[in-house]
Image: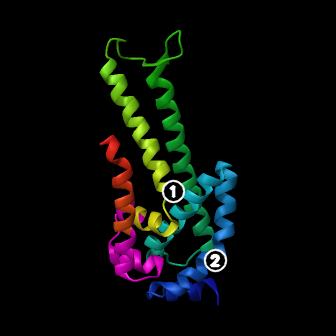
Amino acid sequence: MTDKELISKIKEGDMDAFSELVKRYEHFVMSIAYSYRNSSEDMKDIYQEVFMRVYKAIKKFNQESEFSTWLYRISVNVCNSFYRISKKRKMESLNDYSHDEDGVAIIAHEPVDHKNDVHEKYIRDELIVKVKNMMEALPERQRMAITLKYLEGLKIREIAKIMRCGEGTIKRYIFNASGVLRKNLEPYI
């Protein structure tokens, strides 16, 4: 089946056709992602984001250009977004902190006597790292369901189609993942 035939089927709602398209181009996207970021963790995030964007926008794809060209452009845009975000975080972290003679981090633009501000920022940063680690520890399908629901803002019905399972299963994934996160975050909240 050609790309054009697959895309026509996808536009009609055929999720098997979408899965086939993903299989056909997954190595292509991962290669682009890895070449831009040189990180297997970023590569996975970029891969997921690229195909989420493809899924959301495929109905608008007019097939005047080759699908691979369109996919490449999306992949590069996602890579560039990841680069800007990571660069901004590095710049913020470099600008937000200075260190005293003992190597203790202090906020550069705040007077040293504002210990509560430093403490609150430290707690917030620690919490972000904890949540990230907890998300990574979730089983893959729970992590995907909760990510699609809360970070991408998709409806249960949409997530069920993407993950090719029932809406009840998605609700269970989200419920279980939320329970684990809530339990593990309890000491921090």
The percent coordinates of residue 21 (x first, y second) are 59, 79
Residue under the point 51% across and 31% down: 91
Q: Is residue 151 above or below residue 92?
A: below
**Which of the 4 image quadrants contains residue 126?**
top left
**Which residue is tagged 2?**
23
Please identify the quadrant where the C terminus is shown: top left
Residue under the point 40% across and 30% down: 122
* Measured Cα–Cα span from mark 1 to mark 2: 25 Å
Type of amino acid under label 2: Lys
Residue segment shown in magenta: 148-173
Residue 160 placement, left or right of 91: left
The percent coordinates of residue 30 (x first, y second) are 66, 62
Residue 137 is marked as 1
Secondary structure of the residue carrying numbered label 2: helix
The percent coordinates of residue 144 (x first, y second) are 46, 66
Residue under the point 32% across and 23% down: 117
Mark 2 closeness class: few <14, some 14–19, many ≥20 residues within 10 Å: few
Residue 16 shown in magenta? no
Secondary structure of the residue carrying numbered label 1: helix
